[in-house]
Amino acid sequence: MSSKTVDSMTWHASKDNQDRLMRHPRDFEAWKTFDQLHLQFANDPRNVRLGLATDGFNPFGTMSTSHSIWPIVLIPYNRPPLEFMKQTSFMLSMIIHSKQMAGNDIDVYLKPLIKLIWS
């Protein structure tokens, strides 16, 4: 959409990690292993790499109620470290509201999101 965004979203592929310190997800073995396993995806630096974060909380502030809310946030890891962790980069993709904590059953809620991303 803009030249600044393009430069930012391809940063992970265009900038070298010269001091070899781990400051960005691209510096970790998991990123490198993913690149080796998915060469076609890794060859195009414009492909978006997303991180998913969530944490449930009780909206009423009391543990005696049975309601919980789980915001699901996507974070684009393509961007430089000072940009991808800014609030403006976070994408609230869904909010899970239920009478019970999502816990291990959260994958049921995430399936539509994953299907949307991979289509």
Image: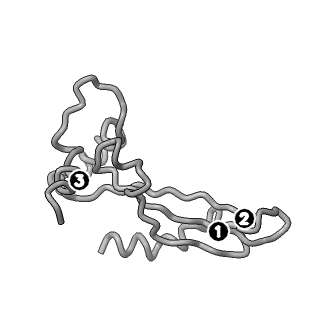
On screen, residue 107 versus residue 78, left or right, reads right
Judging from the image, what secondary structure is the residue with disc 1 in?
A: strand
Q: Quadrant of residue 119?
A: bottom left
Task: Verify CB contact (< 8 Å) between mark 1 and mark 2.
Answer: yes
Category of crowding for the residue at label 3, using alpha-carbon neighbours closer than 10 angstroms: few (below 14), some (14–19), many (at least 20): many
The CA distance from mark 2 to mark 3 is: 35 Å
Of 67 and 110, the residue lying toward us: 67
Check disc 1 and give the amino acid type.
Ile
Judging from the image, what secondary structure is the residue with disc 2 in?
A: loop
Judging from the image, what secondary structure is the residue with disc 3 in?
A: helix
Vertical comparison of 38 with 29: above or below: below
Q: Residue at x 15, y 52 (%)?
A: 43
On screen, residue 29 versus residue 70, left or right, reads left
Where does the image place residue 106, in percent across and percent down from the top left? Answer: 58, 67
* Residue labelled with disc 1: 69
Q: What colour scheme was applied to this rendering of the protein?
A: one colour
Category of crowding for the residue at label 2, using alpha-carbon neighbours closer than 10 angstroms: few (below 14), some (14–19), many (at least 20): some
Check disc 3 and give the amino acid type.
Met
Where does the image place residue 9, in percent across and percent down from the top left? Answer: 23, 53
* Residue labelled with disc 2: 58
Q: Residue at x 18, y 54 (%)?
A: 4
* Residue labelled with disc 3: 9
